[in-house]
Image (cartoon, rainbow, N blue to C red):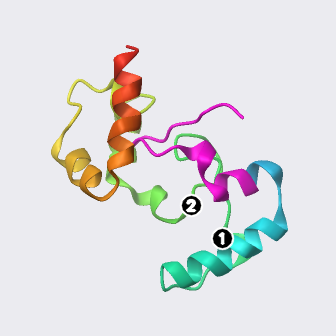
Amino acid sequence: MEKKISACGLICSSCETFQATMTDDDAAREDIAVKWSKMYATQLKKDDINCTGCMEEGASFGYCSMCEIRECVVSKGLQNCAYCDDYGCDKLTEFFGFVPEAKHNLDEVRATL
């Protein structure tokens, strides 16, 4: 599977929800729903586990539909934050504090531009 990077730098193609969606694997969806419900103290169902990537038409998982970072990238017509002239903005820097691997992923993209 080709590496797919989200607006913020997460690797969609490494995400188990994305993988279950791409393979239409209901057993995996059920397992993920149980695991993530416990992990995130919420109630997810198998039908909640669908995502084609935040930058694609189709299903986006949970928060992605209201993500400020995603909205910004879409409004600028970019592939992800790595392509932005304002790379490293406050929203992104705050996010990197929680998910430092996203910065690494976007830095790799920027190195190829």
**Mark on residue 87?**
none
Do callouts 1 and 2 mark residues in contact (Cβ within 8 Å)?
yes
Question: Rounded to the nearest whole Å, what is the CA distance between mark 1 and mark 2?
Answer: 7 Å
- Residue at 51% across, 79% down: 39
10 part of magenta stretch? yes
- 33 relative to 78, above or below: below
Type of residue at label 2?
Phe
38 part of magenta stretch? no
Q: Position of residue 111 (x, y in %)?
A: 35, 18
- Residue at 23% across, 23% down: 85
Quadrant of the image containing the C terminus: top left
Type of residue at label 1?
Asp
The residue furthest top is 113
Q: Secondary structure at mark 1?
A: helix
- 46 relative to 10, above or below: below
Q: Quadrant of residue 45?
A: bottom right
- Residue at 74% across, 54% down: 21
Quadrant of the image containing the N terminus: top right
- 69 relative to 62, above or below: above
**Mark on residue 61?**
2
**First in sequence: mark 1 vs mark 2:** 1
Q: Position of residue 107 (x, y in %)?
A: 33, 29
Please give left or right for residue 72 compared with residue 63 in the image: left
> Label 1 belongs to which residue?
48
Please give left or right for residue 53 compared with residue 99 in the image: right
Start and end of the magenta stretch?
A: 1-20
